[in-house]
Amino acid sequence: MTYQEIQDEVTTALADRLGIKAEDVNLDADLTDDINLDSLDRAELIMRLEETAGVKLDDLALEEIYTPRQLIDLVASLSDG
């Protein structure tokens, strides 16, 4: 997947969760404090990204992810796109 495709997937997933348009997702918002993702929401998002991007996300690396932009960057660094 390309960087843009990964970004689109993340923003679409978050928009679906929040009930807003994908273009309204703030890439620098805190996933927990601003977007209110709980551990189940995060797990579902991670599984969706692993499946669509064909990557395996390391639990330790994910502990350092606080924003959608950081998540996009992590997935992009692991993706072959």
Image (cartoon, helix red, strand yellow):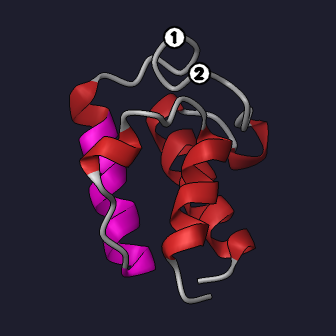
Q: Nearer the viewer, residue 57 or 49?
A: 57
The question of residue 51 being in magenta is answered with yes
The question of residue 7 being in magenta is answered with no
Within 10 Å of the Cα at label 2, are there few (<14), some (14-19), or many (20+) other Cα atoms? some
Amino acid type of the residue that numbered disc 1 sits on in the rendered structure: Asp
Residue at screen point 68% across, 81% down: 2
Q: Nearer the viewer, residue 47 or 65?
A: 65
Q: Nearer the viewer, residue 54 or 41?
A: 54
Rendered image quadrant of residue 51: bottom left
Residue at screen point 59% across, 21% down: 30
Rendered image quadrant of residue 28: top right
**Residue 16 horizontal side relative to residue 6, left or right:** left
Q: Are marks 2 and 1 in contact (CB under 8 Å)?
A: yes
Span of residues in magenta: 42-54
Q: Is residue 32 above or below residue 19?
A: above
For label 1, the SS is: loop
Residue at screen point 58% across, 83% down: 1
Q: Tell me the distance, in whole angstroms, between the alpha carbons under discs 2 and 1.
A: 5 Å
Q: Is residue 49 above or below residue 41?
A: below
**Residue 58 horizontal side relative to residue 7, left or right:** left
Total numbered labels placed on residues in the image = 2
Amino acid type of the residue that numbered disc 2 sits on in the rendered structure: Asp
Task: Identify the image quadrant of the C terminus.
Answer: bottom right
Residue at screen point 58% across, 14% down: 34
**Residue 15 horizontal side relative to residue 17, left or right:** right
* Residue linked to disc 2: 30
* Residue linked to disc 1: 33
Residue 54 at x, y percent in the picture: 37, 81
Residue 49 at x, y percent in the picture: 40, 63
Residue 62 at x, y percent in the picture: 38, 43
